[in-house]
Image (cartoon, rainbow, N blue to C red):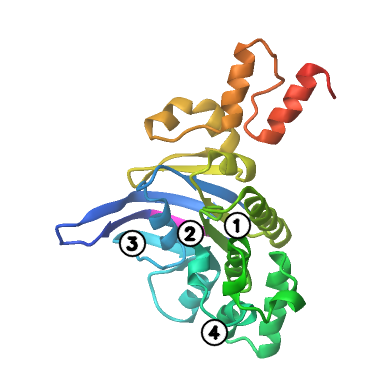
Amino acid sequence: MSIEVKDISYTYMTKTPFERQALRNVTVTIEKGEFVAIIGHTGSGKSTLAEHLNGLLTPSTGTVCVDGVNLNGKGDKVRSAKHKVGIVFQYPEHQLFAETIYEDIAFGPRNSGKSEEEVEKQVRKAMGFVGLDYDAFSTRSPFQLSGGQMRRVAIAGVIAMDPEYLIMDEPSAGLDPISRDAIFAQLSTVFKERDIAVILITHSMEEAAQYASRLLVMAKGQIAIDGKTELVFKEQRERLQEVGVDIPESIKITDLLCEKGLKLEKQAITKEQLVQYIKKAKGWS
């Protein structure tokens, strides 16, 4: 069970003065059950790659297959394969449109042919996953909510489709720290309980280090680095700098503390690890 990207390239606005190649010969496989972060500077091709993973974009060359089904085709199998990949765009609250939260979340399941009984079940389950009480919120307008709550509704609309692969494009953009932590707590719950694949597109190295077990680093429309998160941040700093990607603040602080003479057990890549190692080094635990 995987998404297989084979040698895809993609060019925007071909045969115009604005022609721009966004992807160049990208090959990658993402297995179900993986938590992958795609990082890279603006314009590196992150979002363009993501939009190929569920068939929103069709590659100029190459193929994208979901569980063995080529998305560049027609028919029920292709449609079913595309439905396995849910995508939550950056600022998804801008996509809300229905009069009530229930109707907004119900749109996807209903249009996939589910009965009203099944639709309600999916809506209730999705709202529970994102921490919105069904009785308190289902009949309310999504436009009367806070920014963080609106984003939860948008995420619930995708979760209600029961995706096996979930793409999140900058899910924390514009959110306050409390709302951001709530979104990622719910995302982690969905990932663990449903055993789906999560593909996180982010500019935050802290988010990538905290949640993803694998990093895809993009530069100039290609995958420059593909590896385990911890190893990439620890062993490929020079390469990251070459492609314009920073390292997490926790690593920078670890280096600074070591320079000042504090002997830490290991190099921390997350805040939690940093606190743990400092406590041990100081004899506080």
- The answer to whether residue 277 is magenta is no
Q: Which residue is mark 4?
A: 111
The label on residue 59 is: 3
| Tag 1 and tag 3, C-beta contact below 8 Å | no
Give the magenta range. Answer: 2-6
Nearest to viewer (mark 3 / mark 2) = 2
- 73 displayed left or right of 207: left
In percent of the image, x 53 and y 67: which residue is there?
93
Closer to the chain start, of discs 1 and 2, is 2
Q: Secondary structure at mark 1?
A: strand
Closer to the chain start, of discs 3 and 2, is 3
Q: CA distance from mark 2 to mark 4?
A: 23 Å
In percent of the image, x 67 and y 34: which residue is there?
271
58 relative to 183, above or below = below
- 267 displayed left or right of 227: right
Circle 2 Cα neighbour tier, 10 Å, few/some/many (<14 / 14–19 / ≥20): some
The label on residue 197 is: 1
The label on residue 39 is: none
The x and y percentages for residue 154 are 57, 68
Report the quarter where the N terminus lies. Answer: bottom right
The x and y percentages for residue 234 are 56, 27
